[in-house]
Amino acid sequence: MKEKIDSLRESFEQELSRTMSSDAVEQLRVAYLGKKGSVTGLLKSLKDVGAQEKKELGQHINQLKKQVEERLAQRVESIRAAEEQREIAAVERYDVTLPSKGLTGSYHPITLVQRQLEEIFSSMGFIVEDFKEIVTDYECFEAVNIPKDHPARDMQDTYYLENGQLLKTHTSAAQNFILQKYGAPVRAIFPGRCFRNEATDASHETTFFQMEGIMVDKNISISNLIYFMKTMLSQVFEREVKVRLRPGFFPFVEPGFELDINCLICGGEGCSTCHHSGWVELCPCGMIHPNVLKMGGVDPEEYTGFAFGLGLTRLVMMKYGVKDIRDLNSGNLKALSQFQQA
Ligand code: PHE
């Protein structure tokens, strides 16, 4: 029996060295360790030997079994590594340093304006944060002072996943995360794609971009908010822009405002983009509600702050004179490739 074990070990090693695919290794495993495999057969035949021998042979066979298992695993591993190497070698390679043949792409206008805003705000000491698009009910609503069944939720119907998560309706969904992450004082902007259940028309889309900003510190007031908004808008539009503040309600700010700018498409005369009012709602904003600060771990007795939710998509439309919001998501290169960073 001892010889049988040794010769089995030898033949296993030989066969193993000939395997070239994970399938072949699996076949070998079945042939040796399967129900009818040779090693299994050896173990079964132990019942015919005496007690003393049984113990010794049993040990040998078990050793062989262990060895077979280990060697099979090693082989699978090295075959996989070799397959991976072959795949990598087969990938077509490009020399990215070669000059282009005149087929240069262009940035989407939203990317252009987003980058410009990131630069403007970075220069004023704001950090730029990224945030996910699928969020929890807590992040999107409860942490910004919109409890369950609050009527404000009606205006922000969105797409829900079966597990209760949802596509974020506003960039405010990141406020809690940022307050928790940085504490106070903090200056941050966080651009992002937002989603709402909207009937689309020239100025409404189910998918759009916002850029939110918060500034929390000691003694922050509405004057700080107005200063930052005006500075930012005049840089984006490269001219003085007329703005007006109206009271606006958002559960996460108190007081809250709507910052409108003079419609730059029609110059204030009235067109479909501004719903013939001459003004375009661009930037809801306000002083962060104490509850929101508290939920973010910031003491509202010590700190105050402002928040704004800039309609990035709308800003792009104003800046470049895009009349229909649907053009921006259309993938129509004729429409989208004509924009350049100012
Ligand atoms: N999150 C609000 C919205 O999308 C906008 C907002 C942001 C209002 C920050 C106030 C302060 O409607």
Image (cartoon, rainbow, N blue to C red):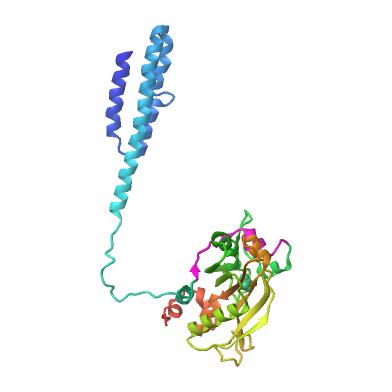
Q: Which image quarter: residue 28?
A: top left
Residue 132 is covered by the magenta coloring? yes
User: Considering depth in this image, is 336 or 139 the residue closer to the camera?
Assistant: 139
Q: Which image quarter: residue 62?
A: top left
x and y percentages locating residue 333 in the rendered image = 43, 76
Whether residue 1 is situated above or below residue 175 in the rendered picture: above
Indicate the quadrant containing the N terminus: top left, top right, bottom left or bottom right. Answer: top left
Q: Residue at x 60, y 89 (%)?
A: 271
User: Considering depth in this image, is 13 or 36 the residue closer to the camera?
Assistant: 13
- The quadrant of the rendered image in which ligand 1 is seen is bottom right
Whether residue 83 is situated above or below residue 145 in the rendered picture: above
Count all numbered tags in the image, as a single digit: 0
x and y percentages locating residue 38 in the rendered image = 37, 22
User: Considering depth in this image, is 116 or 15 the residue closer to the camera?
Assistant: 116
Q: Residue at x 27, y 28 (%)?
A: 14
x and y percentages locating residue 307 in the rendered image = 60, 72
Q: Residue at x 59, y 91 (%)?
A: 268
Q: Which image quarter: residue 342?
A: bottom left
Residue furthest to the bottom in view is 269
Q: In this orientation, does residue 36 appear?
A: yes
Q: In this orientation, does residue 144 appear?
A: no
Q: Which residues are magenta?
A: 126-148
Residue 335 is covered by the magenta coloring? no
User: Considering depth in this image, is 39 or 145 the residue closer to the camera?
Assistant: 145
